[in-house]
Amino acid sequence: MLSGKRILLIISGGIAAYKALELIRRLRERGAAVTPVLTSSAREFVTPLSVSALAGEKVYTDLFDLTDEAEMGHIQLSRVADLVLVAPATADLMAKMAQGSASDLASTLLLATDTPVMIAPAMNVRMWEHPATQRNLDTLKRDGITVIGPDEGDMACGEYGRGRLVEVPQIVAAVERALADGPLKGRRVLVTSGPTHEPIDPVRYIANRSSGAQGTAIAEALRDLGAEVVFVTGPAEKARPTGVEVIEVESALEMRAAVLGALPVAVGVFAAAVADWRVAQASGSKIKKQAGRLPVLEFAENPDILAEVSALGDERPGLVVGFAAETDDVVANATAKRWRKGCDWILANDVSPATGIMGGSENAVVLISEAGAEPWPRMDKRAVAERLAARIAEALGA
Ligand code: C5P
């Protein structure tokens, strides 16, 4: 249910705008109050009168509407809601959002808001697939905006493909998920994920095979329990989680700076596969190939971020969780690692090639804590993440 929740619904122009009328009805049926905002092109598709009749509220349309400024300024309007929902979101509005443009009421509200934002894009398939829209989409996801859809199917313009607004019940379900009062609501948590890239010169680097799958799933599971997640990720192939703050880094040194900058947090989960060494003196220019001479790289040890955070005083998170990827004596090695690193829990897994875990979709972990070793059955990485998130909530007494 959405009782007591207020949604600022921004309707942008496009044939799918008519579905916003149905959306308003369904949101209100679930108990939400809806403050509607129409862009000027949306007014070509739906009338302010029908929108306001269904919402039972005034419709906001113009930035320079002086009455509105007297009653409620745009900054306040952008912040009265529990969620800002853009449905449908056109390619144009997505571009404005990605640019940080404030050229009309809708884009100004989106720039001024401090409330979570969810968008449901709808547009022609070519427009959706255009590199510019995909670039904007990446930017918006990195900015922590939740994106639902679009769906694939027949389009009003006669073409077939991805670009249809997701069905109204799905949008309502996503809104309910986003506004759920989970047990970790109000808790700030940090998750590190992915590999690190250690530069050799401007074009070469040392990397590892981490896909970021487990770290991403953990960030999503913590988000779904209501946590405010800071996701510090190296250059991983896995798509970034939505609805979280994403900080992109390349090297271990950058990851360390991002982690320390994100503190204080209630919980730190360190799932990144951080390179143990970096090249001591990365070259500022490309190292030239020289006949008969091989370059010699000297290494320096990277800081152990998990150990450093575990050893902090006042700023130490209340719960610090590390990972241990082992190939033999998993429990013994991981138990020793827990002591060495000073963290509270270690999730240990056997990454011997025969297990197929590294790069695979499943994981078999042992949770090592003060209480001892607790093996979990082999399961999907998503299920491991959900179980870990539930245990974290339990440990926090949430
Ligand atoms: O020592 P090892 O790399 O096996 O430790 C793994 C754990 O330590 C993981 O939780 C990993 O994210 C973390 N780690 C770290 N900084 C490093 C190396 C590992 O945070 N430089």
Image (tube, rainbow, N blue to C red):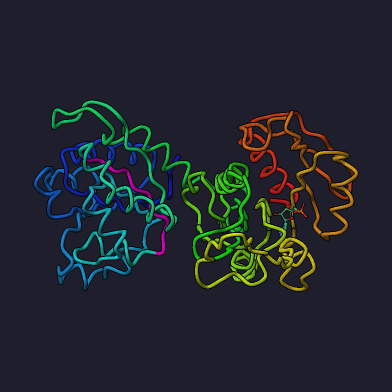
Give the quadrant of the N terminus: top left
**Is residue 229 visible in this depiction of the protein?**
no
Q: Is 389 in front, or is 175?
A: 389
Location of residue 277 with respect to 333 vertically, above or below: below
**Is residue 303 visible in this depiction of the protein?**
yes
Q: Is residue 61 magenta?
A: no
Q: Residue 349 at what x, y percent from top left?
A: 76, 39
Q: Is 134 in front, or is 244?
A: 134
Q: Residue 392 at what x, y percent from top left?
A: 71, 48
* Residue 323 in the figure: left or right of residue 254: right
Q: Residue 369 at what x, y percent from top left?
A: 84, 48
Q: Is 105 in front, or is 377?
A: 377
Looking at this view, name the residue that lies furthest to the front: 292
Q: Quadrant of ligand 1?
A: bottom right
Q: Is 164 in front, or is 326?
A: 326
Q: Which residues are magenta?
A: 114-123
Quadrant for residue 251, please give it: bottom right
Please give the name of the residue rendered at 54% of the width and 49% of the height, measured from the top-left corner.
Answer: 236
Please give the name of the residue rendered at 73% of the width and 29% of the height, measured from the top-left corner.
Answer: 378
Looking at this view, name the residue that lies furthest to the left: 44
